[in-house]
Image (tube, helix red, strand yellow):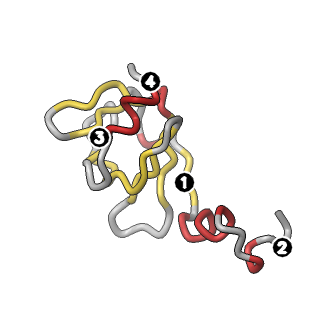
Amino acid sequence: MTDDPHNMRRIQAGTPVVALNGEVLGTVREAHPHYLLVDQPEAHNDLDVPAHAVREVIGGRVQLSINRTALTEVDHEETVHHEHGDPASSGGC
C-alpha cells in the first residue's frame, strides 16, 4: 500500500488502473497527492481513488487494494467548473 504523496505525483495520466479482482477500471485522468481521478471508458463519470487504495504501481499499471464497488463516482465536468470558480456551478453547493 502506498499513500506517499511523492509516489502519487509520479503516476502519469493515461496509466491503466486495475482493481483488486483484476478488473481494468480505466486510466488515470489526474494524479493528486491524496487521490487519483480515473477516466472510465464509455462512462460520463470519473472514479475517485483515494491514495490509501493504491497498492502498487508496477508494470505500467496502478494496482489497487480494493474493487470497483468501494469507489465513488464523480462528475469530472462539474468538478472542473467548481475548482475554477465557474459561476454556473456555484448554485446549490
Q: CB atoms at circles 2 and 3 under 8 Å apart?
A: no
Type of amino acid under label 3: Val
Q: Which residue is mark 4?
A: 4
Mark 4, other Cα within 10 Å: few <14 / some 14–19 / many ≥20: few
For marks 1 and 3, the one nearer the N-term is 3
User: Which residue sits furthest right?
Assistant: 92
* Quadrant housing the C terminus: bottom right
Picture disc at residue 73: 1
Spatial distance from mark 3 to mark 4, Cα to Cα? 19 Å
Residue 59 rendering spot, x and y as whole percentages: 14, 34
Type of amino acid under label 2: Gly
83 on left or right of 8: right
Element at badge 2? loop
Mark 1, other Cα within 10 Å: few <14 / some 14–19 / many ≥20: some
Mark 2, other Cα within 10 Å: few <14 / some 14–19 / many ≥20: few
Spatial distance from mark 2 to mark 3, Cα to Cα? 35 Å
Q: Which residue is mark 2?
A: 91
- For image coordinates 64% across by 71% down, the residue present is 81
Spatial distance from mark 1 to mark 2, Cα to Cα? 21 Å
Type of amino acid under label 1: Glu
Circle nearer the viewer, 1 or 2? 2
Residue 49 rendering spot, x and y as whole percentages: 48, 41
Q: Nearer the viewer, residue 67 or 50?
A: 50
Picture disc at residue 18: 3
Element at badge 1? strand
Type of amino acid under label 4: Asp
Element at badge 3? strand
